[in-house]
Image (cartoon, rainbow, N blue to C red):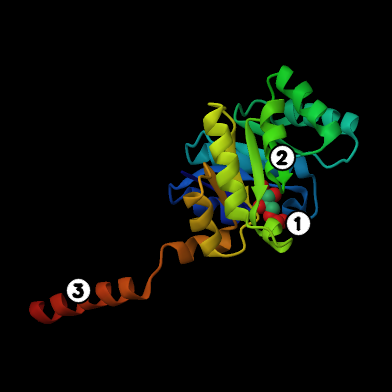
């Protein structure tokens, strides 16, 4: 079970890296578009700089931003040229018929691929079979369509296990803390979480109550 940081914000990423738990970072074009306008390659290099500064060697996903397969391959090559020195770079490619050929082309060049935007069992299985290192299932967006996202994660997990298939399941599109719990219990290898949830994941009113009681009792005894 691993937790990734679903953000391109340098402050959020740094806060998480300082706390030891991140096992990876995922970005997408929408997430990047929330940052200050500028050269996106320089921004990705800054993320890599932070990962290295804090002594991690964790996967970083950067997504292609075209719908044309040949442009996707060219963009992936551009990513490798600019960020390839970071050996844990993953190129995110959306699932689709033509996109499977992109995944294969990249895998044959030993580029690690995170196949993203999977909303169904079939899509995830096809992505894995095409050679994607990671298949990303979009929990919140699946539920938006009225389907049971946990059961899709469970089914993909069961099939990959049956095949002893090495692709790892990332669950993204997290909307509530409960999504994280459910996705992990359903068999996700990884949940990629928006940083706004991290602080809340460490907190509980009964914890505050207990800590306050311990400090107060001991202060009384000391005085
Ligand atoms: C992660 O890899 C995905 O890009 C991300 O979690 C999508 O989340 P959204 O459905 O909130 O856009």
In the rendered image, which residue does mark 3 sit on? Answer: 214
**Residue 1 vs residue 154: left or right?**
left
Q: Are marks 2 and 1 in contact (CB under 8 Å)?
A: no
In the rendered image, which residue does mark 2 sit on? Answer: 122
In this rendering, is residue 105 above or below 19? above
For mark 2, give the secondary structure.
helix
In this rendering, is residue 77 above or below 189? above
Q: CA distance from mark 3 to mark 2?
A: 53 Å
Measuring 65% from the left and 55% from the top, which residue is drawn there? 173
In the rendered image, which residue does mark 1 sit on? Answer: 36
**Residue 6 vs residue 2: left or right?**
right
Rendering coords of residue 62 (x, y %): 71, 40
Q: CA distance from mark 2 to mark 1?
A: 37 Å
- Whether residue 8 is visible, yes or no, is no
Foreground tag (2 vs 1): 2
Few, some or many C-alpha atoms within 10 Å of disc 2 (few <14, some 14-19, many ≥20)?
few
Give the image quarter of residue 45: top right
Foreground tag (1 vs 3): 3
């Amino acid at each position: 079970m691993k937790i990734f940081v679903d953000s391109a914000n340098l402050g959020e990423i740094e806060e998480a890296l300082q706390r030891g738990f991140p096992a990876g970072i995922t970005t997408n074009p929408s997430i990047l578009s929330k940052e200050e306008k500028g050269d996106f390659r320089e921004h990705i290099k800054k993320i890599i700089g932070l990962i290295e500064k804090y002594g991690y060697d964790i996967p970083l996903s950067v997504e292609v931003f075209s719908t044309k397969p040949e442009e996707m391959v060219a963009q992936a090559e551009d990513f490798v040229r600019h960020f390839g020195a970071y050996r844990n770079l993953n190129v995110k490619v959306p699932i689709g018929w033509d996109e499977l050929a992109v995944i294969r082309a990249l895998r044959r060049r030993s580029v690690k691929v995170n196949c993203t935007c999977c909303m169904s069992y079939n899509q995830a299985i096809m992505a894995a079979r095409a050679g994607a290192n990671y298949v990303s299932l979009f929990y919140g967006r699946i539920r938006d369509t009225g389907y049971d996202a946990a059961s899709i994660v469970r089914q993909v997990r069961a099939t990959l296990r049956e095949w002893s298939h090495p692709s790892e399941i990332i669950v993204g599109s997290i909307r509530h803390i409960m999504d994280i719990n459910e996705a992990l219990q359903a068999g996700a290898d990884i949940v990629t979480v928006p940083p706004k949830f991290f602080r809340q994941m460490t907190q509980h009113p009964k914890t505050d109550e207990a800590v306050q009681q311990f400090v107060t009792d001991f202060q009384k005894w000391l005085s």
